[in-house]
Image: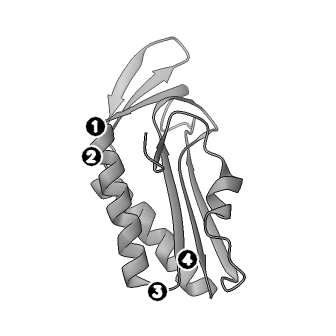
Amino acid sequence: MSRHVTREPIDVGRLVAGGADPARGAAVVFLGTVRRSESDGPVVAIAYSAYEEMLAEEFARIVGEVAARWPGVACEARHRLGDVPTGEPSIGVAVAAPHRAEAFDACRYVIEEAKQRLPVWKRERFDDGSTQWREG
């Protein structure tokens, strides 16, 4: 596993600590959690799978793009693989920057690029034990 991929619950404190620096006065955290809703159905968990090496490389590339695009900004990001229960995060992004606008912009960039570029597959598991593969 790389620092961007985990099979354990995402530790938000660890994500934030990765960018801690007295020169960075703004921190933004995004957590994408497994949801259960009327439109998604009675989801109890999602099993995330991926080509792990490619996932780690692409996530590292996205984080590197943040450093190049927003100098002085630090970014930590993790994607969880395996079975993730409803209400728990499957992806986490923490960005620390000197100012809030940069932090928000960089965080949004990471999550939008991750949704487009990461090779991750999802299989939803429902109350009745049935499953369904879902895109993105």
Q: Secondary structure at mark 1?
A: loop
- Front position among marks 4 and 3: 3
Q: Secondary structure at mark 3?
A: loop
| Residue 71: mark in rendering | 3
Q: CA distance from mark 1 to mark 2?
A: 6 Å
Label pair 1/2, CB-CB below 8 angstroms: yes
Name the residue at 37% across, 81% down.
68
What residue sits right under mark 2 in the picture? Answer: 54
For marks 1 and 4 on the same chain, the one whose residue lies earlier in the sequence: 1
Q: CA distance from mark 3 to mark 2?
A: 26 Å
Q: CA distance from mark 1 to mark 4?
A: 29 Å
Residue type at numbered disc 2: Met
Residue type at numbered disc 4: Phe
Q: CA distance from mark 3 to mark 1?
A: 30 Å
Few, some or many C-alpha atoms within 10 Å of disc 3 (few <14, some 14-19, many ≥20)?
few
Name the residue at 43% across, 65% down.
110
- Image coordinates of residue 65 in percent, x first then y, are 35, 73
- Closer-to-camera residue (10/115): 10
What residue sits right under mark 4 in the picture? Answer: 104
For marks 3 and 1 on the same chain, the one whose residue lies earlier in the sequence: 1
For marks 4 and 2 on the same chain, the one whose residue lies earlier in the sequence: 2
Residue type at numbered disc 1: Tyr
- Closer-to-camera residue (45/61): 61
In the displayed structure image, the side of residue 53 where residue 97 appears, left or right:
right
Name the residue at 47% across, 70% down.
108
Name the residue at 53% across, 61% down.
76
| Residue 102 in view of the camera | yes
Q: Secondary structure at mark 2?
A: helix
